[in-house]
Amino acid sequence: MTEHIRTLLTVICESALESRLVADLKQLGAPGWTLSDARGSGSRGVRSAEWNTEGNIRLEVICSRDIAERIARHLQTRYYDHFAMVCYLAQVEVLRPAKF
């Protein structure tokens, strides 16, 4: 069922970037997204999400591979050098392909 295959773009980053990322997603053609608070530990230490300015968010977009790669390239160019950010792509099978 290749017609049901899409790409899941996941971004975990500083919550301070939320409004910028939403604007970027609209401009870059994301069909929709989900945002949630995220906690964890990594190369930049523990991120507790107890304060809005210190927490992390997890952003997920299900879309075509082309759009996912366009967004990922933009994020790498614009944010990677100055913000804590992890971005990855995964192939997913969706049950309602018309939504994506």
Image (tube, rainbow, N blue to C red):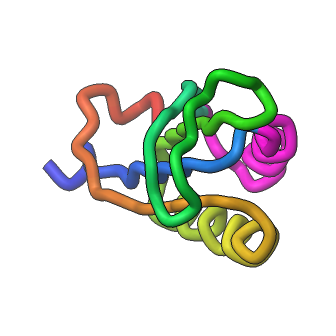
Left or right: residue 11 versus residue 78 is left
Location of residue 47 in the rendering, given as x and y in whole percent from the top left corner: 57, 41
Left or right: residue 65 versus residue 37 is left
Relative depth, front residue between 30 and 2: 30
Outermost residue on the left side: it is 1
Location of residue 52 in the rendering, given as x and y in whole percent from the top left corner: 76, 25
> Relative to 76, does residue 47 appear above or below in the rendering?
above
Outermost residue on the front side: it is 45
Location of residue 85 in the rendering, given as x and y in whole percent from the top left corner: 61, 59
> Relative to 27, does residue 47 appear above or below in the rendering?
above
Location of residue 63 in the rendering, given as x and y in whole percent from the top left corner: 49, 48
| Main secondary structure found in the magenta portion | helix
The residue lying at 32 percent from left, 27 percent from top is 96
Relative depth, front residue between 44 and 96: 44
Task: Please indicate, yes or no, whether residue 98 appears anywhere in the rendered image.
Answer: yes
Residue 45 on the magenta segment: no
Q: Where are the magenta residues, as a range? A: 16-32
Relative depth, front residue between 81 and 99: 81
Relative depth, front residue between 62 and 39: 39
> Relative to 81, does residue 7 appear above or below in the rendering?
above
